[in-house]
Image (spheres, grey):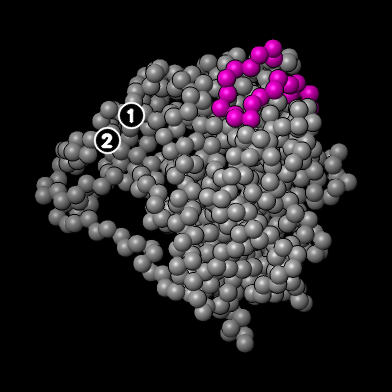
Amino acid sequence: MIKELEIKLLPSEVENDSLIRQRAIQKSRLKDVSDVRIIRRSIDARGNRPFFRIRVAVYAGEQYQAEAAILEQFEPVDEARPVIIVGAGPAGYFAALELIELGLKPIIFDRGKDVRTRRRDLRAIQQFGEVNPHSNYCFGEGGAGTYSDGKLYTRSHKRGNIYKALKLLVEHGAVSDILVDAHPHIGSNKLPKVVANIRETILKYGGEIHFDSQVTDFILQDSEIKGVIVNDRDEHMADAVILATGHSARDIYYLLHQKHLKIEAKPFALGVRIEHPQPLIDKIQYNQSPREAALPASSYKLACQVKGRGVFSFCMCPGGLVVPAATAPGEIVVNGMSMSRRDSPYANSGTVVSVELEDLQPYQKHGVFAGLIFQQSVEQAMFSFGDGSQKAPAQRLPDFVNKKISNTLPGTSYIPGLIAAPLHELLPKGIYMRLQEGVREFGKKMKGYYTEEANVIGTESRTSAPVRIPRDRETYMHEDAKGLFPAGEGAGYAGGIISAAMDGQNVARAVARYYQNKSAVI
């Protein structure tokens, strides 16, 4: 039989496999135990001292049977029917893996570079303020997630098979801990290798991947997709195109609009990134400083309502770094990332305000692009205050609330550097006012959060796409173009690595059904 139960362990005990086995057997009261497997692990820090909750499965009278690898089911697709995928982020790559499993050939085009070559452009933006509009923290192999932490937590449990997505990551080199951790995380130092391994799998089984290949047009015939044009010159034909370009590929939205393919404005969020010393967050959350060695850097999640809009923390990076995430010259965008060990002395989190369509009245002349233009205008305002580099405007947290330019700024992980600025003037009034009240409220919820040791850095603006590419709920196809399948964050149907991966898988299955139906008609 198999019996599931929960045991509690101190941080110093959590890596002791023999102790876990002993405690589990004692609590199960089973005899002839053959194996004990951890199936869930989480931290409970609500009391005076944090501890781990470990859910285990105890096997008695039967053996644990390891699952077969998903990749063992793959077969070559060199001669199979082609499917074009635009974008090599999680939606695109996981769609490709699913297509191979279904016996279809993925052909991927990405405007950016492979994950290794891409590092040179990240260095250029970090150290020299040079933004390559095709290769940066958002564009390139692996998408925005590759170099922005690798957090894998998602609430999208009804949208797909989370376990399958995580297992594929493990089969491509991620640590197996992500299968059991409540808040799984790979780290921006390890995720590039995992992404490169996924590429090798796609190529091994007959898929194609083309970098430095920007899709600049769609080939349409009688409202059906027939292929794409790459780099303004090369035609590539296929009866299905998966559009997985991510939340920052603004040119794709304009192209769709130009081709009279419906897009629509959608709500998003915009604000700042707030950076604290990590020991301060540890003291608040764990009630200890320094924290015990076996405890990971602590995190937080905060939310409140201010004048009818949500104010909330987003993409919290414990032991992390703030990075420049602009995708074009003349804008300042910041994001957060962490290495696998999360050992930076700083913690940072996006702190943003919900932006609803009615908030965009001054931009209504731009139609469906109202949110995009609003987003862009804030990013450009942040840049215009500076010295032409990627130095980000910032204030100490109390100065931000009190509308005061800071005389000095605390230390930061942001390599390009910070410049003292009036964020209270650079941010739109409705955004600033709600952030002002929101962080005061957060200070009440987390004693010590509201401190002069915290930097408020502008601007966190790429939380999600301000545009949605509508698709049919059943077929996943765009209503104006048969064979065009919007997917992932850029289409407005995902928000993070795993949700984007699952959406890519769902869309790949929809493509397979579409091809089956076309074959049946023929």
Q: Is residue 411 magenta?
A: yes
Helix, strand or loop under label 2:
loop
Residue at (59, 79) in percent of width and height: 517
Residue, disc 2:
15
Tag 2 near tag 1, CB within 8 Å:
yes
User: Residue 319, percent across and down?
Assistant: 48, 29
Quick one: which residue is furthest to the top in this view? 407
| Magenta span | 406-430
Total marks shown come to 2
User: What is the chief secondary structure element of the magenta stretch?
Assistant: loop
Residue sitting nearer the eye, 4 or 345? 345
Q: What amino acid type should be assigned to the residue bearing mark 1?
A: Ala
Q: Which quadrant of the rendered structure holds the C terminus?
A: bottom right
Residue at (49, 41) in percent of width and height: 188
**N-term mark: 2 or 1:** 2
**170 displayed left or right of 336:** left
